[in-house]
Amino acid sequence: MTTQIIKNTVVTLDYNVTDPDGQVVDAGREPIIYLHGGYDDIFPRIEEELHEKKAGDTIRVKLQPDEAFGDYDAELVQIEPRKDFPKELEVGMQFEGAPEGSDDEDFIVYRVTEIADDKVVLDGNHPLAGMALIFTCTVTAVRPASAEEIEHGHVHGEDGEGHTCH
């Protein structure tokens, strides 16, 4: 029996992501496995395009920034004193913090994008923010979700492996 992708099915995808010029942004070394049906496990536009597809089907979806990782927000870039950071500091390292002027509970991840003399530039934007992206996905498997997966709103690994529900 060929299972279609419908609400409450677990979908496995081989995928890759490029920018509009064809440059690979994510080679998709690991498959995406998600629970289909509005659980926010995957971008809504991709989920929409995959609806009612079957194993073996391939889709290609161009996402605008607002459909993917959002527009680039210059206000999420901060310059901080170098002395506030560990001695071992490299571009690409990540730190969690609250944006200036926000509630202390609004933590986001900042990446170090530049280190100069006595200053460090931190960027709270996702590295792909502001980019249009082209997702090419091939459905490799579709199965009905378990009652527990539906209740929890996400996929559980084989024999509950990787299960991190609280």
Image (cartoon, rainbow, N blue to C red):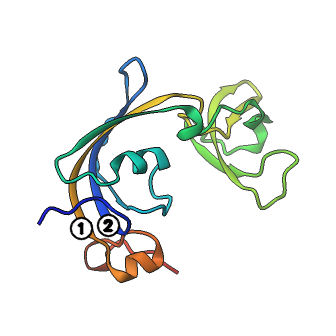
Q: Residue at x 67, y 40 (%)?
A: 124
Question: Which of 8 and 25 lies nearest the eye of the viewer?
Answer: 8
Asked if 163 appears above or below 47 in the picture, the reply is below
Left or right position of 17 against 70: left
> What amino acid is at disc 2?
Thr
Residue 6 left/right relative to 77: left
Q: Secondary structure at mark 1?
A: strand
Q: Residues within 10 Å of mark 1 (few under 14, many from 20)?
A: some
Identified by mark 1, the residue type is Arg
Is mark 1 in CB contact (under 8 Å) with mark 2?
Answer: yes
Q: Residue at x 61, y 38 (%)?
A: 70
Reply above or below: 106 against 122. below
Q: Element at badge 2? A: strand
**Vertical placement of residue 90 versus 143, above or below:** above
Foreground residue, 151 or 7? 7
For disc 1, the marked residue is 143
Q: Residue furthest left?
A: 1
Q: Position of residue 75 (x, y in %)?
A: 78, 34
Q: Earlier in the sequence, mark 1 or mark 2?
A: 2
The answer to whether 108 is drawn above or below residue 148 in the figure is above
CA separation in Å, label 1 and label 2: 6 Å
Image quadrant where residue 35 sits = bottom left
- Residue 9 circle label: 2
Nearer to me, 71 or 80: 71
Q: Quadrant of residue 58?
A: top left
